[in-house]
Image (spheres, rainbow, N blue to C red):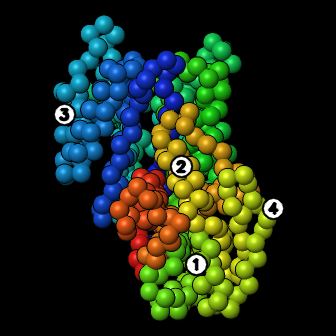
């Protein structure tokens, strides 16, 4: 496919609460994507349970072919109204995107979503409809390359009330800011990280409400080939080098021995950049036709730690990776640039990567790579692997 649906969300919990009262759930298959964001009434455990029930019901029913009417009526009947405030126990925004990039959105009591196309704010015509005595707003439109949908919980609109801002952000102010973020950031993750950071600052690091942003971007497919470790059989060195030579994708080498194979088989010069060396991260190297060459286990292990933190929905666990070192560059390429990551993993065992406490054959490097692939799948990346 020429395009990729980049889905990411980030949240901050209300100050002193262990659990977030906002919840995002999404699934994808050959027919497209179903994405649901819900905001449970109140905060803490109760709100978390209510929002989780809402997203689970919606995603499960819609995935199994239920109509939007049946789905919403089930949610309404399962979650009663608050008897005191006469409010629904949870609000929600449901997004369905089919395989032709036709988007359908149903909204109930969440702040209206934001839609950007061609670096512009695009107003969308919405139809009001009653489903089970609830007022639902529905919209349909075609998503094009570069288009973005952002959904925020009301904690984002209220950020700063009584602190940095008297009345919080207005919806229009949030709209303008998100437009600029989407114009300068390639990935949904970067948009969300920047936005939720601003919300946290407006709350003086003590959020008065659970705050969540969900971003859905239509991106150009960007494939990266990652070559990790030499083949178990040295006769496969030439085969590996041929894959490197013929690939039209971005190319990364992780590991000194793998880099030496490429240098020898492809007759290229490998140049180490000592200025990129950090205390705990070995230096990177340069080689023509490759986008990045790094050391193996240490760099991969640190990158895995970074991606685990980035995958946590909470802003408090986010990290900075703008430094000039192998780990920061690799994290950026895998998380922000690539949409499809192809791993070519050599099975040769380096004795230095063998943990003496584990049985023979349990390779630390391979364990790190498998963890990395799992975390990248959680980040919504399309992952393929070939073992050599």
Of residues 114 and 52, the one nearer the viewer is: 52
Residue 74: assigned label: 3
- Residue highlighted by disc 4: 275
Residue 264 drawn at (x, y percent): 64, 89
Local crowd at mark 3 within 10 Å, few (<14), some, or many (≥20)?
some
Residue 53 drawn at (x, y percent): 26, 32
Real-space Cα separation, disc 4 to disc 1, in angstroms: 22 Å
**Location of the N terminus (image quadrant):** bottom left
Of circles 2 and 3, the one toward us is 2
Local crowd at mark 4 within 10 Å, few (<14), some, or many (≥20)?
few
Real-space Cα separation, disc 3 to disc 4, in angstroms: 60 Å
Q: Give the side of residue 181 with respect to residue 82, left or right.
A: right
Of circles 1 and 3, the one toward us is 1
Residue 258: assigned label: 1
Is any part of residue 343 visible from this angle? yes
Instruction: Give SS at disc 3.
Output: helix
């Amino acid at each position: 496919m020429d395009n990729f649906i980049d889905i990411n969300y980030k949240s901050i919990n209300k100050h002193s609460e262990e659990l977030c009262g906002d919840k995002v759930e999404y699934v994808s298959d050959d027919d497209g994507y179903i994405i649901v964001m819900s905001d449970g009434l109140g905060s803490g455990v109760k709100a978390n349970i209510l929002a989780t029930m809402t997203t689970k019901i919606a995603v499960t029913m819609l995935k199994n072919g239920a109509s939007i009417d049946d789905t919403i009526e089930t949610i309404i009947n399962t979650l009663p109204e608050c008897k005191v405030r006469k409010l629904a126990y949870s609000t929600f925004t449901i997004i369905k995107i089919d395989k032709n990039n036709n988007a359908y959105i149903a909204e109930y009591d969440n702040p209206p979503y934001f839609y950007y196309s061609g670096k512009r704010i695009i107003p969308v015509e919405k139809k009001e409809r009653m489903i089970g005595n609830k007022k639902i707003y529905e919209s349909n439109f075609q998503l094009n390359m570069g288009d973005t949908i952002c959904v925020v919980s009301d904690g984002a609109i209220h950020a700063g009330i009584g602190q940095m801002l008297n009345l919080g952000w207005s919806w229009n102010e949030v709209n303008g800011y998100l437009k600029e973020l989407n114009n300068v950031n390639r990935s949904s993750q970067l948009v969300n990280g920047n936005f939720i950071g601003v919300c946290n600052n407006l709350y003086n690091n003590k959020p008065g409400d659970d705050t969540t942003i969900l971003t859905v971007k239509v991106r150009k497919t960007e494939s990266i080939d990652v070559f990790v470790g030499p083949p178990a059989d040295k006769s496969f060195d030439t085969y590996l080098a041929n894959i490197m030579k013929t690939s039209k994708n971005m190319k990364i080498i992780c590991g000194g021995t793998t880099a030496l194979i490429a240098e020898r088989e492809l007759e290229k010069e490998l140049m180490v950049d000592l200025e990129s060396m950090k205390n705990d991260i070995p230096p990177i190297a340069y080689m023509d036709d490759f986008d990045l060459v790094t050391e193996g286990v240490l760099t991969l292990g640190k990158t895995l730690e970074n991606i685990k933190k980035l995958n946590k929905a909470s802003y408090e666990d986010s990290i900075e990776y703008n430094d000039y070192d192998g780990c920061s560059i690799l994290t950026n390429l895998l998380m922000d640039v690539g949409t499809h990551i192809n791993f070519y993993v050599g099975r040769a065992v380096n004795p230095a990567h063998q943990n003496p406490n584990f049985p023979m054959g349990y390779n630390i490097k391979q364990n790190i790579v498998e963890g990395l692939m799992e975390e990248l799948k959680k980040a919504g990346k399309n992952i393929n692997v070939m073992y050599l």
